[in-house]
Image (tube, grey):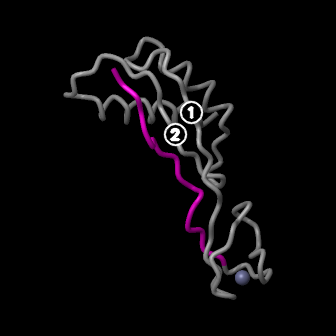
Amino acid sequence: MHEMALAEGVLQIVEDTIRGQNCTRVTAIRLEIGALSHVEPDAMRFCFDAVIRGSVAEGARLEIDTAPGRAWCHNCGHEVALPSLIAACPDCGGFQVQVTGGQELRVKDMEVN
Ligand SMILES: [Zn+2]
């Protein structure tokens, strides 16, 4: 389950972000997970709950936003929605699509106190 490593990475980002700031607890974390990132939100929640135990983010609420897959089609010159990495352009059926969004996994926001 690669979500475990990803969850540890998220916690690392959170700890790096609050280092040097005057806060003792992270109460909520908002993640953005791209639809094409191969990250399962449910698996991420499960792993995240495990890795935050004993950390500054213990008990934090995890909110997950899903970013849609986006691509640029070189064939028809449109920016299109892409449901998967092996999908053809929904406009023209071409496969010369370049993914432009939906592969990200990032910390969008967090609440601390
Ligand atoms: Zn196209």
Q: Three-letter amino acid code at disc 1?
A: Glu
98 to the left or right of 90: left
Residue 22 in picture, x, y percent from top left: 22, 22
Q: Does any atom of ligand 1 lie closer than 8 Å to the CB of label 2?
A: no
Labels 1 & 2 near each other (Cβ < 8 A): yes
Judging from the image, what secondary structure is the residue with disc 2 in?
strand
Residue 66 in picture, x, y percent from top left: 62, 47
Of residues 113 and 95, the one drawn nearer to the viewer in this rendering? 113
The N terminus sits in image quarter:
top right
Q: Residues within 10 Å of mark 1 (few under 14, many from 20)?
A: some
Looking at the image, which residue sits at the far top?
54
- The number of numbered discs placed on residues in the rendered structure image is 2
Residue 55 in picture, x, y percent from top left: 40, 16
103 to the left or right of 29: right
For marks 1 and 2 on the same chain, the one whose residue lies earlier in the sequence: 2
Q: Three-letter amino acid code at disc 2?
A: Leu
Residue 110's place in the image compared with 36, above or below, is above
Q: Residue at x 63, y 66 (%)?
A: 70
The residues colored magenta run: 97-113
Q: Is residue 103 magenta?
A: yes
Q: Which residue is drawn at 30% across and 33% down?
A: 16
Looking at the image, which residue sits at the far left?
20
Circle 2 residue: 31
31 to the left or right of 1: left
**Magenta span: chief secondary structure:** strand
Residue 4's place in the image compared with 87, above or below, is above
Circle 1 residue: 63
Q: Residue at x 80, y 80 (%)?
A: 93
Q: Residues within 10 Å of mark 2 (few under 14, many from 20)?
A: many
Residue 108 in picture, x, y percent from top left: 45, 43
Q: Residue 83 carries which label?
A: none
